[in-house]
Image: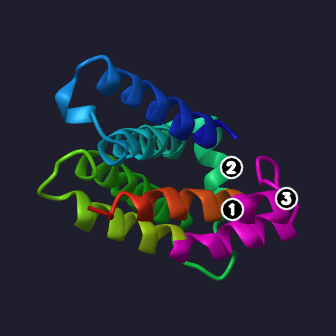
Amino acid sequence: MEPLIALVVGFLAARLAGVAGVDALDAWQPSLRVGVALMFLLTTFAHFFPKLRAELVAMVPPGLPRPELLVTVTGLLELAGAIGVLVPATAAWAAAGLILMMLAMFPANVSAARRELPGATRLGPRTALQVVFVGATALTLLA
């Protein structure tokens, strides 16, 4: 739920800044990029904060090798994507990469929900959130 809050609050705050006169945010698309970036910065934090990291490592499906390394790499990719969506020259590539990563990581969320792991969101709500996250990130691709 926290990533959704970060997405919405980041978008609305950036949009308000645009209306207040910040030219770079005076449209919905750059404001949405701020929301997406804030969402991924928050999720990046989870990859490196010990208690949350342990939950993410546990979510890695059992058949995949080196779960700690996978969590570290995906955290770094989320950080790079969060920064990348804010830079106009890299925004489209970053958004596309984040979308692909979310799609690739979704089976881990399914696995965690089915195994009823601590910190895992039930499958129905998680699927709905994933659609929102992928959709919001995809909307940043529109010019």
Going from N to C along the chain, the mark reached first, 2 or 3, is 2
Disc 3 target residue: 122
Q: Which residue of the protein is positioned furthest toward the top in this rendering?
A: 20
Instruction: Tell me where residue 99 appears, x and y as whole percent.
Output: 44, 68
The kind of secondary structure the magenta stretch mainly shows is helix
Numbered tag placed on residue 59 in the rendering: 1
- Asked which secondary structure carries label 1, the reply is helix
Numbered tag placed on residue 17 in the rendering: none
Disc 2 target residue: 55
39 or 92: nearer the viewer: 92
Whether label 2 touches label 1, CB < 8 Å: yes
Residue lying at 36% horizontally and 57% vertically, measured from the top left: 140
Residue lying at 75% horizontally and 71% vertically, measured from the top left: 110
Amino acid carrying label 1: it is Met
Whether label 3 touches label 1, CB < 8 Å: no
Q: Which residues are magenta?
A: 103-128
Amino acid carrying label 2: it is Glu
Q: Is residue 83 left or right of residue 9?
A: left
Amino acid carrying label 3: it is Arg
